[in-house]
Amino acid sequence: MNDNYYEINGYDRNTNKVTRSNLNDLSVKKGIFVISISSLSRHLDDLLRCYDNPFKEESQKRNRERRAEKTKERKSKKMPRSFSESATMRTLSFFIVLLCVWISFRMTNRSKFSFSFSSSFSLNSKSNSFWIFQDILLDSEALEDGQAPARSLEYDFYRETCPEADKIIRAKVHQLFKIKASLAPALLRLAFHDCFIEGCDASILLDAVEGMDSEKDSPPNESLKGFDGIDIIKSDVEQVCPGVVSCADILVLAAREAVLLSGGPFYPLNTGRRDSTASFSDSATNELPSPHADLSETLASFSSRGFDERETVTLLGAHSIGVIHCKFFQNRLYNFGGTDEPDPTLDSEILEQMRSKCPKNHSSSSPAAPPFSDGSPMKAPRSPSLYNSLSSAVPPSTSFDKLLSSSPKDQGTVMTYGGTGADFGTVYYRSLLQGKGILYADQQLMAGEETGLWVRAYASDASLYQRDFALAMMKLSNLHVLTAPRGQIRLNCSRVA
């Protein structure tokens, strides 16, 4: 026999004996099943004993009883150990599950981000991950400085401290809109200018003080309106919930209502923002998008805030509402690029229309503002009496009329896409397809392959644009927000508390 056979059956070739200690009743090796020699020998002995024993039936009975007793003893010995092991494993599993739940709860509280549209927000996941990561970094920095971790934005943040906040803001914006519809684009662009510079922290609302310039006085922001509207809303909220609702939240919520009133989409917003204690005039001057920028500059500006090409095209569609001052496009009409000629990309019909609104001798001392500059008439000087009139006996509508009236010198010096109501957004993109973009930066969207693709898509599909605009505005409203313990709640939006 070969070596495999002896190895399989436990046969010792040196002693010429079978070693029982090396055997099992059934041996398996190298895929071959073999009944061992020892097993055959044992069965043969039992047969012989039964044959020679005249009392074999009684002997067999005793053997069966002995085997049954041994089996019972083995089971009785194993059961306590098996039960104990099972109980231990169940206890261990229970504690592991508790540990996992606890870890998950802690991680959720640390890294939870708004709606997060993600809802984010089925928001664009690629760019959202950047802001979520940044929020986590900010929390880590606060911990390293010995501060408490920053809270996250929450849906209905004021449900316990000021449950009427949303209702008050909505009602006041609707009231103002009925008196002067131009407030809607003013609030929308005011929110954009705030969020684009150092985040949605209401820094755009601060007045200049000694040692700090104001963003609202920077050249790109000179034509912004809506400041007094925010003050009115804040006053109403303070009467019900003093020192609770931030100006930053009021601004983004008012802008949402303005979009809705202009025919745009409703979009949910988380709240819990805090107000900045500083204004960033230099950043506003240098970092807001320019109406004279070519496509690459515009895309780079929006990309620095985490917006991709599609989102950039979407947000620029806000130009569909409001009006645009001559100073933002006059160079396209008479001296484009220093050529003493109009912009060759301008449609001849729109060129004549724009020249009729903005004659060559029309001039403005104010520098140009970015594409999201206020589309409403030029801002009139703020008067304390207008704000104080809210608490006077004068009917509110009277002060609102004064508040929202435009300066006579600015009449007839503006252009508009006229894209309110059902045409919100789409009329703007159709104008670009026809070469009738008012701003150079607007018309430049047709110069890129991907941006041009989205212009065509939005021009033909209003529902697609409304969906994308809602997502982009949710993302814009969450840029670099301050949450407790950072920032503060201002009692007056134009002054640090």
Image: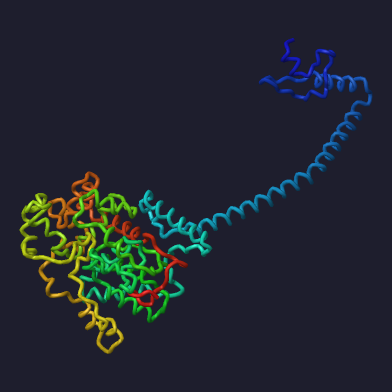
Residue in the foreground of this view, choosing between 41 and 83: 83
For this rendering, which residue is in front, 200 or 103?
A: 200
Identify the residue at horizontal 23%, vertical 56% (top origin): 462
Depth check: 348 or 149 in front?
149
Work out whether residue 119 can be spotted: no
Residue 144, position in %: x, y?
A: 52, 59
Q: Is residue 195 left or right of residue 30?
A: left
In this view, 46 is above or below 487: above
Image coordinates for residue 339, horizontal then vertical, percent: 8, 51
Is residue 436 visible to us here? yes
Q: How many marks?
A: 0
Residue 434 position, x and y percent, is: 12, 51
Q: Quarter holding the N terminus?
A: top right
Which residue sits at x=30%, y=74%? Answer: 230
Give how far across and how far down residue 411 sits, in percent. Answer: 12, 71
Out of 341 and 425, give the one closest to the viewer. 341
Q: Is residue 302 left or right of residue 55?
A: left
Residue visible at 15% across and 75% down?
407
For residue 475, what is the image quadrant? bottom left
